[in-house]
Amino acid sequence: MKKLIIVVLALFLMTGCGANVTKEDYEQKITDLETKLEALSEQIEALNDTVKELTDKLRDGDSYHVLDVKTANGVSSVFVEMIQGTLGFDGELPDRLEFLENLTRDEFGIYYHHEGSFEEVIVFKALGKADLDLTGEYAGATILADLSTDQVLIALVNLESKLDDEAKTYLTNQDVAIRFAAERFTLNQSALTK
């Protein structure tokens, strides 16, 4: 019995000696793990992009969608699917302003955002001509364009801000009320490409 155990142990030792792990084996395992880590990092980056995209679509409890503003030759433009047209204005948006579409209220416009503060600066809304009442709910609105579908596009500039003093100072320094007054926008409904 002792001899049998010694033979079995000898066989195990010989098998173990034949299966020595080399430096190259460890290097290959490290390379394999680094490849897997790189693939996981790419997946994490893709998921982070998705989270950012979804976060950009939600603002302040309403369903907002960030519209892509393109600037070329000193003129900015944004395609708005809601009105099937491109809205244009001179210059670029300041860093704390975004062009958003409010899916909940069927309107779009420029909104201020900074460190949790969030407020409309100028809002555009397509209204049926029969619903247009510039003395009531839309007092102070400017008719920006006739959409030729028995609708008009109106613009409301928000001059009475509820933001903190820093935000009000920023908006004043950027001259937002003048730079983005309703009459400074142009609408092109023939350019339907994004």
Image: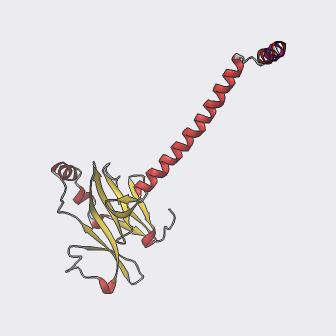
In the picture, measured across the screen, residue 132 lies left or right of residue 36, that is left
Q: Is residue 61 magenta?
A: no
- Above or below: residue 138 compared with residue 101: below
Q: x%, y% of residue 71?
A: 42, 53
Q: Residue at x 75, y 17 (%)?
A: 20
Q: Quadrant of residue 29?
A: top right
Q: Is residue 13 above or below residue 165?
A: above
Looking at the image, is 168 positioned above or below residue 181? Answer: above
Residue sitting at the far front: 1
**Residue range corresponding to the magenta coloring:** 4-10
Residue ID at (48%, 71%): 190
Check the picture and name the quadrant holding the N terminus.
top right
| Residue 9 drawn in magenta | yes
Q: Extreme bottom residue here?
A: 130
Which residue is drawn at the image coordinates 49% and 67% (left, top)?
Answer: 191
Magenta stretch: dominant secondary structure: helix
Question: What percent of the width, then of the height, locates residue 172?
Answer: 19, 53
Q: Position of residue 74 (x, y in %)?
A: 38, 52
Q: Is residue 65 above or below residue 92?
A: below
Front residue of 148/105: it is 105
